[in-house]
Image (tube, rainbow, N blue to C red):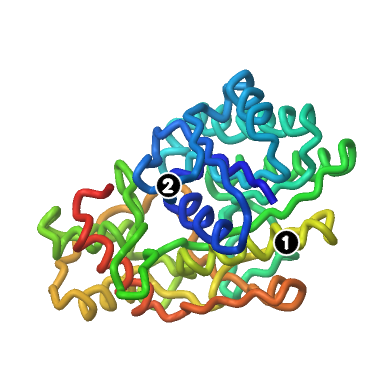
């Protein structure tokens, strides 16, 4: 199958592109490089530089490459920023997705795997299933929910087959057989806990900030479910294959276990051998206290399960990446 990967130069998009290729698919990457990197793209993959909101550029890419399916990763993802500048999130994420869907419809492309998020849920103390109440705490989560609803209508009206994968916290790095890091996180600016924590032993910051230590959790800090980047990538391959027989799918992707921010920092200390000083500061708007996945549905229906569930292994792979790429790509 020929897949147009929108946002394929980013962290998750580039890793998934490599997995698509390993599964025997052909990949074309479309990215505006505002948050992605040309060097993250797998070798010999056709690349189109363009914006998801640029209908003419999308139309040209579809005409030139005639894809059979689309994998959509091109979104702004920072929940905190979405609460201070909501307009750019609604424009890029929602308007961009509708523009993409209209071009897909024009070119009669009826398969999409969509990068969604656990931020669509209202938080709760137990692992979240796909049937749990929806209630985004941030504009970012709201934009992803709006896109999921749009996909449902494009299915009804245009016959789109889609899978929305609700990620929990993507983390870790892709390593080769010799343990050398191939792809990892390189956000500019960085806002994710694991790479920020690892910047301390790299000498890039003096301490790590804890945004809120008064949440209703055992140690007062937020609890999250971390999933390895390679497990995310493999789930996209499974979802793409299932679009032949499943018209509408929504699945959680996670490990089913949550770790508090303090626990993540403690494991990073063990992995790096650095004390990693902590500074407690105020909560950020849009952060739910607890987000942990139940991935039983995708386990049951598609046979997918994570191969790298251990937090220490996730952080160790991230550490291998950041040590060898301290300044990113």
Please rate how many residues cluster around mark 2, counting C-alpha atoms within 10 Å: few if below 14, some from 14 to 19, many from 20.
Answer: many
Cα distance, mark 1 to mark 2? 22 Å
- Name the residue: 61% across, 29% down: 61
State whether residue 169 is above or below residue 57.
below
**Is residue 228 toward the left or the right of residue 220 in the image?**
right
Q: Is disc 1 placed on a helix, strand or loop? A: helix
- Name the residue: 59% across, 68% down: 124
Q: Is disc 2 placed on a helix, strand or loop? A: loop
**Is residue 268 toward the left or the right of residue 75 in the image?**
left
**Is residue 177 toward the left or the right of residue 106 in the image?**
left
Give coordinates of residue 25: x percent, y percent. Answer: 63, 55
Give coordinates of residue 93: x percent, y percent. Answer: 57, 35
- Name the residue: 53% across, 36% down: 30
Quickly name the residue at label 1.
Answer: 241
Quickly name the residue at label 2.
Answer: 41
> Considering depth in this image, is 31 or 262 the residue closer to the camera?
31
Please rate how many residues cluster around mark 1, counting C-alpha atoms within 10 Å: few if below 14, some from 14 to 19, many from 20.
Answer: few
């Amino acid at each position: 199958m020929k897949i147009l990967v929108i946002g394929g130069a980013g962290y998750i998009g580039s890793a998934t592109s490599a997995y698509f290729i390993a599964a025997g698919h052909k990949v074309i990457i479309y990215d505006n490089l505002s948050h992605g990197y040309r060097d993250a793209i797998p070798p010999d993959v056709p690349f189109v530089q363009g914006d998801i909101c640029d209908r003419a550029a999308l139309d040209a890419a579809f005409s030139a490459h005639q894809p059979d399916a689309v994998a959509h990763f091109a979104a702004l993802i920072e929940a905190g920023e979405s609460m201070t500048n909501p307009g750019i999130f609604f424009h890029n994420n929602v308007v961009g997705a509708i523009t993409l869907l209209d071009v897909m419809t024009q070119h009669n492309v009826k398969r999409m795997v969509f990068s969604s998020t656990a931020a669509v849920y209202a938080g709760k103390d137990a692992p979240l299933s796909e049937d749990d109440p929806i209630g985004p705490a941030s504009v970012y989560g709201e934009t992803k929910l709006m896109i999921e609803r749009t996909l449902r209508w494009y299915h009804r009206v245009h016959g789109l087959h889609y899978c929305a994968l609700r990620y929990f916290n993507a983390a870790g790095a892709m390593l080769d057989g010799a343990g050398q890091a191939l792809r990892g996180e390189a956000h500019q600016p960085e806002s994710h806990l694991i790479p920020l924590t690892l910047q301390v032993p790299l000498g890039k910051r003096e301490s790590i900030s804890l945004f809120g230590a008064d949440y209703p959790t055992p140690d007062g800090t937020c609890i999250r479910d971390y999933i390895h980047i390679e497990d995310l990538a493999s789930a996209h391959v499974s979802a793409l294959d299932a679009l032949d027989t499943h018209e509408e799918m929504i699945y959680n992707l996670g490990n089913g276990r949550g770790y508090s921010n303090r626990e993540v920092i403690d494991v990073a200390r063990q992995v790096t051998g650095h004390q990693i000083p902590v500074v407690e500061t105020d909560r950020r708007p849009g952060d739910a206290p607890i987000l942990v996945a139940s991935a039983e549905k995708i386990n049951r229906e598609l046979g997918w399960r994570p191969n790298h569930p251990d937090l220490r292994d996730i952080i160790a792979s991230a550490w291998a990446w950041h040590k060898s790429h301290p300044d990113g790509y």
